[in-house]
Image (cartoon, helix red, strand yellow):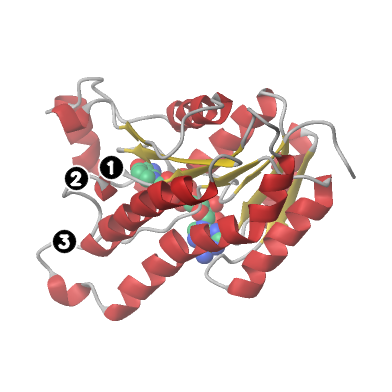
Amino acid sequence: MPTLRPVALVTGSTSGIGAAIARRLSNEGFALVLHSRSSVAVGQALAAELGDAIYVQADLANEPDRERLVQEAIAAWGRLDVLVNNAGISQVIAHADLAAATPAVWHALHEVNVVAPFRLVALAESALRAAAQPGHPACVVNISSHAGVRPKGASIPYAASKAALNHMTRLLALSLAPDIRVNAVAPGLVDTPLTAGWTQAQQLWKERAPMQRAARPEDIAQAVAMLVASHYLTGEILMSDGGLNLT
Ligand code: NAD
């Protein structure tokens, strides 16, 4: 069903940060492709609620699913203007517990947090280029983490995967300009299902962060919307941690 609206694909958009990004872009006039690994009923309900939105289930650890997701996204609306690589996984492992960070953990996190976003950009590249107009490039936003910038985070494999995503963001920004801008948002702690039990981190943000709280998913969605609205910014890693990195 072709649309005159710009189209955004937001991965991992049935919960947490991704759902907030999808709602925000929908409010700003985008037709949406929602996606998650497993919560089909939630995705379909959100698509019905937003209107001009479809939902696609796909396991991003798996290449045929990545290919199908991008094909179905483009087929749904006939164009693709924005790709938000939000889906990601984390595993909490004490940084000093080297034995617990097994090869299996490294491979699993790398596949979903690094390989999948790269492959989605590669698979969507021609559609994104086709949507770009002179002076109005298409756009990719990767959701990385402050853990990819500072020596922090749920585990060393998680932090290293997000550092790789940040560097990939800059490399792709250089390779895909001027048709496609590529930026990242690097949240600190965000109140989502992923972090519901992270009481120590919540305390840290309350006591040490200049903004005295963790982010709400809507704060991160606003940062994404700012990057999407720009026609110029590219290669930026926008730290969104309430200023914790200043302390
Ligand atoms: P969440 O668990 O609520 O959402 C994660 C989403 O990723 C889900 O929709 C899930 O379906 C999807 N996903 C995970 N593995 C997948 C797979 N194999 N295939 C397809 N989809 C998959 O988490 P969230 O907190 O909203 O996190 C969203 C992003 O923000 C992640 O990339 C995360 O690393 C990043 N982030 C979160 C925080 C935080 O404090 N919550 C902080 C920094 C960065």
Q: Where in the figure is residue 78, as x and y percent of width and height?
A: 83, 47
Label 1's element? Answer: helix
Label 3's element? Answer: loop
Quote the CA–CA distance across marks 2 and 1: 6 Å
Q: Nearer the viewer, residue 101 or 124?
A: 124
In the picture of the structure, the residue carrying the numbered disc 1 is 146
Do the residues under discs 2 and 1 have CB atoms within 8 angstroms? yes
Give the mark nearest the N terminus, 3 or 1.
3
Label 2's element? Answer: loop
**Residue type, numbered disc 3:** Ala
Quote the CA–CA distance across marks 3 and 1: 17 Å
Quote the CA–CA distance across marks 2 and 3: 16 Å
Q: Where in the figure is residue 75, as x and y percent of width and height?
A: 82, 54
Q: Residue at x 35, y 40 (%)?
A: 186
User: Which one is closest to the eye, mark 2 or mark 3?
Assistant: 2
In the picture of the structure, the residue carrying the numbered disc 3 is 94
Using residue 124 as the reference point, say whether residue 174 is left or right of it: left
Quarter of the image where one finds residue 220: top left
Q: Is residue 244 above or below residue 212?
A: below
Check disc 3: other Cα within 10 Å, few if <14, some if 14-19, many if 20+.
few
**Residue type, numbered disc 2:** Arg
Check disc 1: other Cα within 10 Å, few if <14, some if 14-19, many if 20+.
many
Q: Residue at x 85, y 36 (%)?
A: 3
Q: Residue at x 61, y 41 (%)?
A: 179
Give the mark nearest the N terminus, 2 or 3.
3
Do the residues under discs 2 and 3 have CB atoms within 8 angstroms? no
Disc 1 under 8 Å from ligand 1? The reply is yes
Q: Where in the figure is residue 2, as x and y percent of width and height?
A: 88, 42
In the picture of the structure, the residue carrying the numbered disc 2 is 150
**Residue type, numbered disc 1:** His
